[in-house]
Amino acid sequence: MNKATTLLAASTITLTLSSAWAQTSPGVNVDAFEAYFSEREKCSAFIGDLVTPVAANMAALNSVHAMRFWLVSHLDNKLSNIVIDVQSDTVKYGVLNPERERDQIKVTKSLYKALQRLPGFSGSGCGPDVREYMMSALYTGLGGENSLIIKELKTNNIKDPWDQQWVILTAIMAGKLSPEWEKF
């Protein structure tokens, strides 16, 4: 079972359990509850379709710099085009630091704008929180806590998985990285 299938199976189990809980809980609008989780599942699949085709190639790389280079050198996939759009949009902010929250927000706002231009986005169930799906898909697609890039982040004292996801997303998609990240 590949990673995308595993994620979809976990999402389906969560939806099934949540639906059962909603049906037995008084005062819960079951239809709204199920619709919410259905939209989440659709968004996860939409983002998975962007990340999964390139994840194995990216996972073999042990630096953000190498991933950025690989993505802009392989324009035959949707994720590369999204990354280029986000990088082009965020370059106006100057140097960005993937560890700084305000820089992470700049990148994720640009990511949302870029994704909105994709065919099928309006029916994907994704909203402004799409960054969380992208962060999770990248983290999982790159191999999770056992990936080369996560080991490198841990070496650089970024140990929390949530922080690692933010840093990966921002470092890959920022237009211009701070000097310490250009070497990373």
Image (cartoon, grey):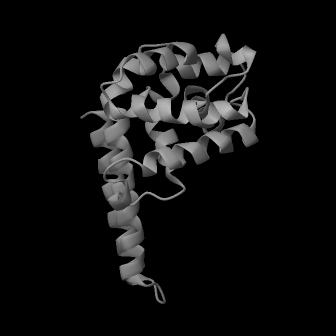
Query: Which residue lies most toward the top here?
Result: 183
State left or right for residue 98 relative to residue 131.
right
How many numbered marks, from 0 up? Answer: 0
Closer to the camera in the image, 36 or 12 = 36
> Residue at image x 45%, y 83%?
25
Q: Residue at x 32, y 65 (%)?
A: 16
Q: Which residue is drawn at 68% across and 22% down?
A: 177
Specify the quadrant of the image occupied by residue 43: bottom left
Rendered location of residue 117, percent (x, y): 41, 49
Q: In this view, does 67 lie to the left or right of 37?
A: right
Question: In the rendering, at what x and y percent does residue 19 appear?
Answer: 36, 72
Residue plotted at (37% across, 54% down): 121
| Image location (x, y in percent) of residue 137 | 43, 39
Instruction: State which quarter of the image contains the N terminus.
Output: top left
Q: Which of 175 and 14 is in front in this view?
A: 175
Q: Nearer the viewer, residue 63 or 154?
A: 63
Q: In which quarter of the image is residue 126?
A: bottom left
Return the x and y of residue 174 as percentages of the image width and height. 61, 30
Residue sitting farthest toward the bottom: 27
Residue 14 shows in this picture: no
The quarter in which the C terminus is drawn is top right
Quick check: can you spot residue 99?
yes
Vertical order, 144 against 112 (above or below): above
In the rendered view, tell whether residue 85 sits above or below residue 25. above
